[in-house]
Image: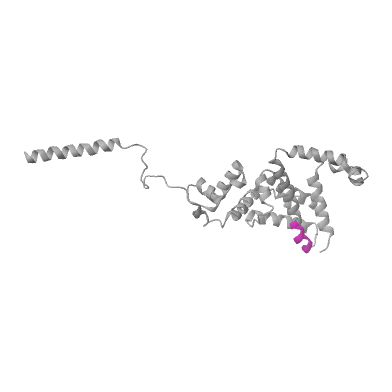
Amino acid sequence: MVVANMVVTSLFVANMFVTLGAMTPSNERPSRRERPAKPALTRDGIIQAALAIARADGLEKVTMRRVAEQLDTGAASLYVYVRNTADLHAAMLDEILATVDLTPATAAGPWRQRLAAVLTSYSLVLFANPALAQSAMASRPSGPNYLSLIECLLTLLKAGGVPDDQAAWGVDLLMLYATGIAAEQGALSGRAEAHDEYHALVAALRGADTARYPEIARLADQLVSDGDRLAWGFQAVIAGIAATPR
């Protein structure tokens, strides 16, 4: 009888474990071995995740912690690939510079027009990424796309016969002008009151006291006239670079 009871008890316990196994919740966290492997963390993957956040929520939301959450990893893991947030912003800027059209460097036509075309393409890329346009005023990218852009500008200045020393300093002016215009537009595009502020400025210029501000009153319409100011600005800066010895 004792042996029989032991057999019955064993069968009961075995059935109980089977039943409990069947009752285990289906959403129980799988073992690490059963979970699909995460994609390998890379610098390019980090940059792409950061760009996605910037386009969706703005550059101010691009933090190491937020990017790490996007990639399902810890923030500390990112520092293997990027030094800090400033380095990440610079890398993001370099990434979008890949879309700048550099083909005018090898095209036919007057060198000044070709140079202005490259700079215009650069400006349009920043116009399309207003958050990064503002960041570009402080970031110092050093990636391959940035270097390709600088190489292109120097090549075109050389084609125009601009002395090397003037070209070397002139590139800085060209980039500063193009970046500044884009950053200004980026800042204005994010402010609902910018339209009203512009009309207030136009009214102030056109209504200036002729006795106190005679030149403003005389040129008020010209100060706010329409036209391709970006293209004119490039030509003015290029002409100054070519004509001004160091």
User: Residue at position x 85%, y 42% from top?
Assistant: 205
Horizontal side of 194 relative to 8 (left or right) equals right
- Residue 130 quadrant: top right
Task: Assign the C terminus to one quadrant of the image.
Answer: bottom right
Magenta residues, dominant SS class: helix
Residue 108: tell me if it is visible. no
Q: Which residues are magenta?
A: 164-172
Outermost residue to the right: 211
Q: Is residue 50 left or right of residue 246?
A: left
Q: Is residue 66 magenta?
A: no
Evaluate whether residue 60 shows in this view: yes
104, 2: nearer the viewer: 2
Q: Is residue 125 above or below residue 16?
A: below
Residue 203 is situated, as x and y percent measured from the top left of the image, at 84, 38
Question: Which residue is found at the position 89% from the left and 45% from the top?
Answer: 216
Determine the residue positioned at 72% across, 42% down: 188
Residue 227, quarter of picture? top right
171 in the magenta segment: yes
On the image, the x and y values in percent for residue 20 come to: 26, 37
Q: Nearer the viewer, residue 106 or 32?
A: 32
How many numbered discs sit on the rendered protein? Answer: 0
Q: Residue at x 62, y 44 (%)?
A: 58
Classify residue 4 as left or right of residue 99.
left
The x, y position of residue 195, in whole percent, is: 75, 37
